Amino acid sequence: MAVLGNTTPLQPVPGTTADTRRRKADEDRIGGSARRRTAGRVVGYALLVLFSLLFLYPFVWLLAASLKGRGQVFDNRLWPREFHWDNYVQVFDELPVAAWMVNSVVIAVLAAVLVAVSSSLVAFGFAYFRFPGRGFLFGLVLATMMLPGAVTMIPVYLIWKELGFLGTWVPLFGANLFGSAFYIFLQRQFFLGLPRELFEAARIDGASYWRLFWKIAMPLSVPSFIIVLLFEFQASWNNLQAALIYLNAGQPSDFTAPLGIAYAMTRYSPTAGGQGDYQFVMVASLLVTLPMLVLFAFGQRYFIEGVATTGRKG
């Protein structure tokens, strides 16, 4: 009589048919998975190239149009029949492009710095201090983002009119002295991610609240501060509506870049007595676009870091 003892499962002998089938199945599974990853990567790259071309097309069209002669600007050819390099020289004789760009830079820098500093101060107050009604007040600040710009446009215009600032640059950046709800929210989220122990230790050492803000909070929030600067600089640079409302009655040399380009379109329109020299408008449009490209290229690292680190705590 056989004695039953501990038995082990039978293992396929290497080289047998079962072992070969299992090895082949594993190889097929690994190979199929690799092929799927490769196919997905190829499709992803193809989509990236496609969308890149779609986004680059307007810029390439603008570049080609700026090198064309009168009457050929809107022929949609991406390679001009004849290159008019002198357009980039004549545009400064035709239009005060340099003055427009200087005006826009000054206004955009003032607007960006004012809103970044003021929003950071308010955001630090909401992030650090604990006081009754803090959540309600912060909710009111966020609620202001629900108001359409068309609702406040006329009251704000009347305020600047009563203050005597119509026709000046002040309305284009003055309101930024009081912060922005979106930037306050952005900065507050970043401040909430900072260790509170740093501020408590500084308070024990006798640091004032202002010192907490300038010496601890601000140095640690450089990425979010720069992202606010970039956002507001870009928004102010492209702000046609405000310039149209407050500067339209002034001299063309006092215009910002967007308002100047709108003025040039009207000036060269045949219906307004112009000769249709839209190639100068295209040159001016290209020149005022380049600073935004350069700004994003140099600030891209802070842009990505600032966006990635502002939603960590709520």
Image (tube, grey):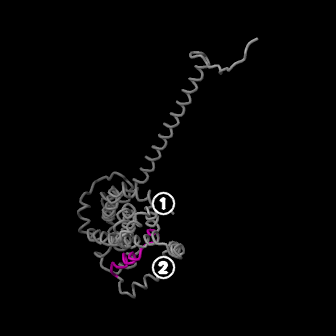
Tell me where residue 292 appears, x and y as whole percent. Answer: 34, 61
Where, quadrant-wise, is the N terminus in this rendering?
Answer: top right
Q: Which residues are magenta?
A: 167-184
Q: Quadrant of residue 184?
A: bottom left
Numbered marks: total: 2
Q: Mark 2: few, some, or many residues within 10 Å (few <14, many ≥20)? A: few
Residue occupying the point 29% across, 68% down = 101
Q: Is residue 226 magenta?
A: no
Residue underneath mark 2:
152
The residue at the point 34 percent across, 67 percent down is 215
Q: Nearer the viewer, residue 81 or 205?
A: 205
Whether residues under marks 2 and 1 lie with C-beta atoms below 8 angstroms apart, the answer is no
The disc placed on residue 311 is: 1
| Residue 182 or residue 286, whichever sits in front | 182
- Magenta stretch secondary structure, dominant: helix
Is residue 212 something one can see in this rendering? Answer: yes
